[in-house]
Amino acid sequence: MDIVFIRELRADAVIGVYDWERSIRQTLVLDLELAWDNRPAAAGDAIERALDYAAVSSRVISCIEGSSFRLLESLAEEVAELVLSEFGVPWLRLRLCKPGAVLQARDVGVLIERGNRPE
C-alpha cells in the first residue's frame, strides 16, 4: 500500500485545560500519513483517482479551527474519524503537536494510528 502524506499542516484552535487557554487560539501542527493505492491514479494520470490532499488539508483545518477540545487526544480522535469516514482512507497515522506547551521542548503531542493498514 502506498502512503500519501501531509506534513506540518498548521491550524489555530481553542485547546487546553487551563482557563487562560480557553480564551485564546493556539497554533497546532499536524502530520498525516494516509494509506492509499496510487496505482489507479498513476496508470491514467487521473486526478479523480488520486487522494486529494488539498481537500483533506482544507477539511482538517476546518475541523481543527472549529473545535474547542480540552485535550489533544480528543481532537486527534475527531480528526482521524473525519479523515477515515469522509475520504475513504483505510488507515492513517496522525501526529498532532502543540508547540510551546512545555517550555523545554520544541513541541509535545500525540501520535495515533487508526484503521486497518493494508499490506
Image: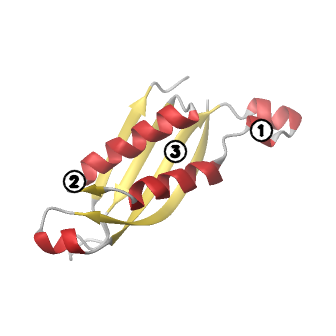
Q: Residue at (21%, 73%) from the top-left corner?
A: 23
Give left or right: position of 54 versus 60: right
Give left or right: position of 100 versus 12: left
Q: Nearer the viewer, mark 3 or mark 2?
A: 2
Q: Nearer the viewer, mark 1 or mark 3?
A: 1
Q: CA distance from mark 3 to mark 2?
A: 22 Å
Q: CA distance from mark 1 to mark 2?
A: 36 Å
User: Badge 3 local density, few (<14 within 10 Å), some, or many (20+)?
Assistant: some
User: Badge 1 local density, few (<14 within 10 Å), some, or many (20+)?
Assistant: few
Q: Which image quadrant for residue 89?
A: top right
Identify the mark at residue 48; answer none if there is no mark: 1
Amino acid type, callout 1: Glu
Residue 83 position in % (x across, y down):
49, 40
| Dot 3: element | strand
Per the image, the residue denoted by label 2 is: 71
| Dot 1: element | helix
Identify the mark at residue 33; answer none if there is no mark: 3
Q: Which image quadrant for residue 21?
A: bottom left
Of the 4 image quadrants, the one containing the N terminus is: top right
First in sequence: mark 3 vs mark 2: 3
Q: In the image shown, does 113 or 68 lie closer to the viewer?
A: 68
Q: Report the number of numbered marks.
A: 3
Q: Residue at (39%, 37%) from the top-left corner?
A: 113
Of the 4 image quadrants, the one containing the C terminus is: top right
Give left or right: position of 5 versus 66: right
Amino acid type, callout 3: Glu
Q: Residue at (29%, 65%) from the top-left corner?
A: 14
